[in-house]
């Protein structure tokens, strides 16, 4: 019975992502963002429970990636679609009879994200060198970048979030940059702790401290900086590796 617990939690991840899509398509991007965050919690818990219960399986590995494509590829792309359509003045209403160039762009730009998320996850499943660190931005981190902007816009009226999610250029650049980072080979630190010692976990502790201080000092306005901080510390870990 316990061997099915990790897969059940993974299914909760998938369900959260699916319901998130329904909410954003009905005009509730904030609720959708919280549901993606819930999916991230389930994504962490399924791996943790699998290690705790020693309930590893090939099915679980594939199911996890399939759920991640929905929750961290399709769902954040739907949020991009929502804000991009608002910036274009289309409000999500696409003409089925006459597909105009703006309609095509509205469909094409967000579609890049789930495609790159799927490629990134497929590579991860087949790349044995990504056990201790990642190559390319993990799909949950990419989704977090989108979600953090949506929440900062809603709860802090962030100027940065407004300039990105409130404009065509901002949404397009955000999508392209995040999609590229997922499929590039830039080394990224993994947040998996094997123990609580500082040695071997320097960059992880540095990341946690920087993010915690940012949120304590600036609240929701700090959210858009979480993923850039993660990327910056990952680059530092490459340039100045821990000895």
Image (cartoon, rainbow, N blue to C red):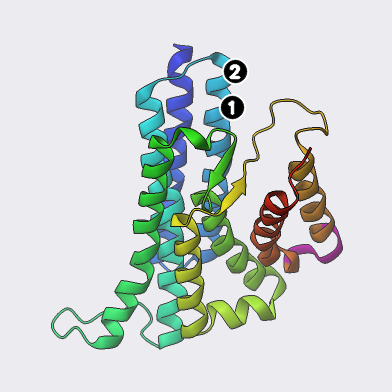
Q: Which residue is mark 1?
A: 48
Taking depth in this image into account, of 125 and 98 the one nearest to the observer is: 125
Q: Tell me, for residue 232, which label it has, or none.
A: none
Taking depth in this image into account, of 102 and 36 the one nearest to the observer is: 102
Categorize mark 2 by other alpha carbons within 10 Å: few (<14), some (14-19), many (20+): few
Q: CA distance from mark 2 to mark 1?
A: 6 Å
* Residue drawn where x is 36% and y is 43% of the image: 122
In the rendered image, residue 55, in percent from the top left (x then y), is placed at 48, 16
User: Which residues make up the magenta segment?
Assistant: 216-220
Specify the principal SS of the magenta part.
helix
In the rendered image, residue 140, in percent from the top left (x then y), is placed at 53, 49
Q: Is residue 82 left or right of residue 43?
A: left
Q: Which residue is mark 2?
A: 52
Q: Is residue 119 above or below residue 217?
A: above
Q: Secondary structure at mark 1?
A: helix
| Quadrant in which the C terminus appears | top right
């Amino acid at each position: 019975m316990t061997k099915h617990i990790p897969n059940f939690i993974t299914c909760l991840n998938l369900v959260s992502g699916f319901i998130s899509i329904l909410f954003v398509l009905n005009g509730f991007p904030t609720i959708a963002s919280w549901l993606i965050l819930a999916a991230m919690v389930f994504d962490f818990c399924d791996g943790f429970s699998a290690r705790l219960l020693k309930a590893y399986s090939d099915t679980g590995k594939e199911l996890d990636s399939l759920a991640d494509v929905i929750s961290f590829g399709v769902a954040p792309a739907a949020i991009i679609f929502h804000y991009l359509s608002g910036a274009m003045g289309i409000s999500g209403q696409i003409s089925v009879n006459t597909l105009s160039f703006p309609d095509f762009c509205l469909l094409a730009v967000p579609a890049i994200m789930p495609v790159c998320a799927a490629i990134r996850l497929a590579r991860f499943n087949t790349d044995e060198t990504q056990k201790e660190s990642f190559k390319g931005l993990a799909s949950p981190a990419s989704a977090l970048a989108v979600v953090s902007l949506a929440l900062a816009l809603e709860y802090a009226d962030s100027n940065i979030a407004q300039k990105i999610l409130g404009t065509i250029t901002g949404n397009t650049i955000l999508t392209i940059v995040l999609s590229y980072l997922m499929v590039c080979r830039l080394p990224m630190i993994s947040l998996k702790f094997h123990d609580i010692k500082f040695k071997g976990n320097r960059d992880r502790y540095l990341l946690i401290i920087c993010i915690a201080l940012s949120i304590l000092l600036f609240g929701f306005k700090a959210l858009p900086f979480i993923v850039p901080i993660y990327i910056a510390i990952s680059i530092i870990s490459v340039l100045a590796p821990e000895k």
